[in-house]
Image (cartoon, rainbow, N blue to C red):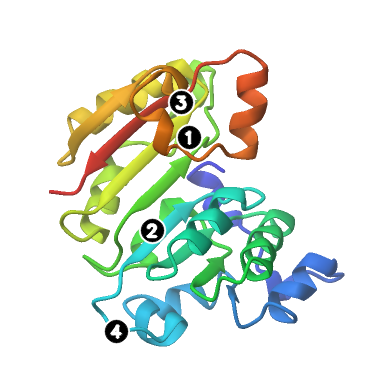
Amino acid sequence: MSKSGQLRLARTRTIPIPNEYILALHGEYGDWCYDEERTPELRGQWRKEAFRVPETAPLDFEIGTGNGLHFAHHAIKHPERCLLGIELKYKPLIQSIRRARRGGAINARISRFNAYMIEQMFTPGEINDVFIFFPDPWEKLRQQKHRLVQDDFLLKLFEAQRPGSRLIFKTDSQDYFQWALTRFQRSPYKVLGHTVDLHKSEFAPDNFVTQFESLFIRQGLNIGYACMERV
């Protein structure tokens, strides 16, 4: 969604005929999901109010969970870390939290919110590692202003993270990858490593393959990968 579109984000409570996923957000998964109105109320309070953990507990953040394969994997593999995801579409939002819950994770929460408004979600230094996997590449030149990885967005994200935290980025678009890498390199982040072909790189053994990623691999597309540190 573009920056101009963020103000047109429909409020869940105003949808006249909610589908099963909207009903699940406030019903079956109401203790694990937060809509666009509840989310800002937890700014600075995610550990205390949503996860009920000490302020020292790691809180990771996934932007755009899709159907939740990585979201669930990360939550289940790291029960000592909290994981908050955001997703705009109701179906993948519920799929993500359902997948994590059915896998036994109690450390995962998810929000319907727009990543462009991240400063409304977190106070400075509130989150730890951040994952941005396969965001919309907005390939046409006139669309590039809508890309998530922009200089101002990275400054907001940097401020929201705790020192020593990582930002991990993956995309199947080599054009977007080069665009993003340029912005990572001129941001306050320290670039720890990057590659234009993740699956033939030193980073492959520790990589979790998402559903989108498996589709791109079958199509013969290289995956761009970058890992940054919030110094």
Badge 4 vs badge 2, beta-carbon distance below 8 Å = no
Q: Which residue is mark 4?
A: 54
- Say what amino acid the circle numbered 1 marks: His
Which badge, 3 or 2, is on the more N-terminal residue?
2
Task: Classify the position of the N terminus by image quarter.
Answer: top right
Question: Is residue 61 left or right of 110 when viewed as pictured?
Answer: left
- Compared to 142, does 193 lie above or below? below
Tell me which corner region of the image, top left, top right, bottom left or bottom right, holds residue 57.
bottom left
Badge 1 vs badge 4, beta-carbon distance below 8 Å = no
Question: Is residue 110 left or right of 82 when viewed as pictured?
Answer: right
How many other residues sit within 10 Å of disc 3, few (<14), some (14-19) or many (≥20)?
Answer: some
Q: Which residue is mark 3?
A: 144
How many other residues sit within 10 Å of disc 2, few (<14), some (14-19) or many (≥20)?
Answer: some
Badge 1 vs badge 3, beta-carbon distance below 8 Å = yes
Q: CA distance from mark 1 to mark 4?
A: 36 Å
- Say what amino acid the circle numbered 4 marks: Pro
How many other residues sit within 10 Å of disc 4, few (<14), some (14-19) or many (≥20)?
Answer: few
Which badge, 4 or 2, is on the more N-terminal residue?
4
Q: Which residue is mark 1?
A: 146
Residue in view at x 38 percent, y 68 percent = 81
